[in-house]
Image (cartoon, coloured by chain):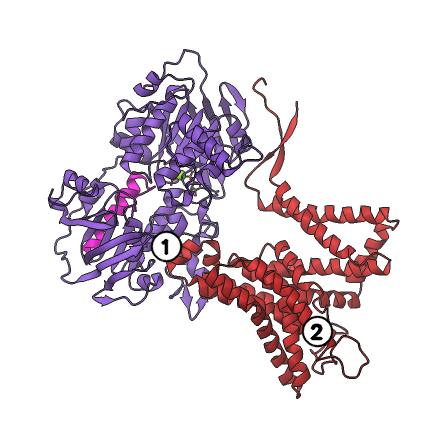
Chain colours: A purple, B red
Amino acid sequence: MGVPLAFPPGTAADAASGRPPAIPPGTPALVELQGITKAFPGVLANDAVDLTVMPGEIHALLGENGAGKSTLMNILTGIYQPDAGTIILDGYARALPSPQAAIRAGIGMVHQHFKLVPAFTVAENIHLGWSRTPWRASAAALEARTRALAERFNLAVRPDAVVGDLSAGEQQRVEILRVLARDTRLLILDEPTAVLTPAEARELFAALRAFRASGNAVIFISHKLDEVVAIADRISVLRGGRKVATRPAAGADERGLASLMVGHDITLRKARPRAAGTLVSAAPVLELDRVCARDDRGLMALRDVTLALHGGEILGIAGVAGNGQRELSQVVTGMRRVTQGAVRIDGRPVARTDAAAFAAAGIGHIPEDRLRSGLAPDLSVADNAVLRDYARPPVGKGGLFRPWAAARLARTLAAEAAVAVPDFGMPVRNLSGGNQQRLVARREIRIAERVLVAAYPSRGLDVGAIDTLLSYLAELRDRGRAVLLFSEELEEILELADRVAVLFEGRIMGVMPAAAADVETLGLMMGGRGARA
Amino acid sequence: MSWRLQRVPNVPAGAALAGRLGAIVAALACVAAVLTLAGLAPGRLGAEVIGSAFGSIEGLEDLGLLVTPLILTGIAVALTQRIGLWNIGGEGQFNAGALAATAVGLHVGGDEIWVLPLMALAGAAGGAAWILVPTLARAFAGVSELITTLLLNFVAALLVAWLCTGPWRDPSGRALATTARIPAELPPLGDTLHWGFPAAIAVAVLAAGLLAFTRFGYEVRIAGANPGAALYAGIPVRARIVAVMLLSGAVAGLAGTIELAGTVHRLQGGISNNYGYLGIMVAVLARGSCLGVIAGAVLMAALLNAGIVLQTQGVNTSTVLAITGLILLFTAIGDEVVHYRPVRRTSAAD
Ligand SMILES: Nc1ncnc2c1ncn2[C@@H]1O[C@H](COP(=O)(O)OP(=O)(O)OP(=O)(O)O)[C@@H](O)[C@H]1O
Ligand SMILES: [Mg+2]
């Protein structure tokens, strides 16, 4: 996709070519980190990390969940203060005592979890907390300014749209515009593509290349190794808080990078064949019969959806994000009322929309947006670990809640999820993004006696953790449980699912055995074309 | 070399506490300065204030009398804070509780063993009834509880004033603008203090236990921390909002009952003595922690007591309100100031 961008002072030709600009010898690094160390109670998040980012470079940062990537970037953006180490910008040692100082120094970050105000419009979000926002400004004036900015940086946003109504990709464009508008020279993106569709990711990459072409730099954190190899100029790997390598992306291979991350050789994407003797149940455990449902804005989001999910199978739901996946996952977990049709568990129609009853019936749910619904970020790890178990023994008994039993269960879950938690009383928001996801996934797998509804379960996980998670899903299937797997990655679905259903504009376009499905047909169906084109 | 202030987003707990203590000291220093300007000796007054509250058994008992309603109205606010709401109507619920308890106390005869619990029940029910409409409006129509609870305060105060001067006026004619003395009284605990004081502390401990050790409390904490997570877990958020708000009103109503049956013994206009509003400050000082409310109430009571002492020295009665306001203001400033620290300005040239 040719992107005719004009990042001052780069030329359109540079931008379109996407090649890093030639840097005169002797140019100081845009950023040089020396010996950055940061400890939290019980963890050494960064241990004497050195990192150099040159102007005109896209530098990828890799590492397992909890390796310290976000922490390092939070130091570079003035959110945390390092315990030791030096930050050198353009050859001068600088203190970055606050995010404002980092912004003034030209460093901007788009965080792993979006930080926009959902109730505000795009224009309001762009101008929030910005010294150059006019003191008195009408909504129309802010929108006009936003439109001008959007044009200048070639990021398509709708200035008057309310952020809460936007798709993840659109929200991210707003975040990036917000950062770029503040004269950023170093753009830091923390797992920017985790929530993007492949098309949105391609657009993002085009914008990043254009940004780099004018001598700016990008630090890019991602767990998607193929993507990293494709977009980055150099790659640095963190392991357990230490930097273990920096190498050029040219010639790097995914396997090599993965082993650098974990410290030993790993095999990725093992086949996960059915265990011998696993049968698919004759009667469905979960059925949707001509179900219709509305989304939060009251628009029809599911139309006449009929699906049957059997024990011992994995049913993949493919589709471009925003075609009813969110509503479907909520209907099958008792979070959303259906306006028409019936939901049946083990053949019995459910009388009430009650998420607790669904959970008690053995339906686990790894939600799409773990921070907005799967966790209460300000409450403790222990409180969050028992969100599904607080009402039954040993945590709950006769109306009581036993914090010590909650802590014990949390310890078990954390051990199963391979998450190191120094203090179960600390807010769960202090865990790394991937570790939060691991914990939610384990919690839900534990209660999934009948069905596991997994919405984008591998988002934010490192390669090893994705591997483990997919094995768990296969294991659930082998034990006769049903899995409903939502994913944007067709490969993941085709690799794991027994059947694939395609969702388009709230309708099921077709259901087919995964063995008979190919990427082309699925792609057509995801675009709204019928099963037999 | 120049210095400037810069904001740090995360503040360690120790610094936060220091900020609070600093705020209180700064507020008191301001008061001292004003008193000096007014020609009074703040040092001597301070000694007198501390001596009167903490220097004798009587002083401590009087302090306890002030602490009692403040704990309860503070708990009323802290409870709703946990589910993300503000009950600004403690004052009205206090009055409604006192009123309901008076109705029982004046019209139900019999042994105190029966009448007192009945008054407590009536008082709690009165407080809960007073917050019922704001509760339903909040839970089912999303109407902000801030305004509805606040407005009902004035209605309750007027209702009490009318009853005391009208239908329930003391028939003996000896006291003006109050009801007759209510025969049932809380058993004393010392000279002036009564069993309302330990009861209030028990309520604070129970409220803390309710939030920490019951299923209900857990659900309230989840619903308050992230309504999205409550929906996900199938926690009935509306039902919890209704329960917490009614409970909050009941606790404030109980405060009114205890004040009536333990300290004042007659319903009269102004019986609530701003305890409902001061409870908001207590809860803010306690940062919404139920056990912290006890400490916050002691601090607030010491200030009220100081006001009484200052009054005997010829200082205006509203001074004490100004002092509490100053403390709250300085606390808010202190909470913000701890986010800043001086750093040397670094320019590109050094
Ligand atoms: N504010 C905090 N308080 C306590 N511990 C923290 C805090 N922030 C991060 N940590 C810990 O520091 C470690 C590194 O976390 P960080 O978020 O940097 O990981 P990450 O590399 O970004 O991982 P992920 O890929 O999962 O996002 C983790 O063990 C995390 O629990
Ligand atoms: Mg991270």
Say which residue appears at 40% left-offset and 46% top-offset. A420
* A456 sits left or right of A54 in the view: left
What subunit carries mark 2? B
Q: Which residues are magenta?
A: A456-478
Residue A474 falls within the magenta-colored stretch: yes
Q: Residues within 10 Å of mark 2 (few under 14, many from 20)?
A: some
Q: Nearer the viewer, residue A321 or A451?
A: A321
Q: Which residue is mark 1?
A: A412
User: Looking at the image, in which quadrant does ligand 1 appear?
Assistant: top left
Q: Nearer the viewer, residue A239 or A220?
A: A220
Say which residue appears at 58% left-offset and 46% top-offset. B13
Q: Which residue is mark 2?
A: B162
Residue A259 makes an appearance in the image: no
Q: Nearer the viewer, residue B247 or A177?
A: A177
Task: Tell me the chief SS of the magenta region.
Answer: helix
Residue A303's spot in the image, x, y percent?
A: 24, 54
What subunit carries mark 1? A
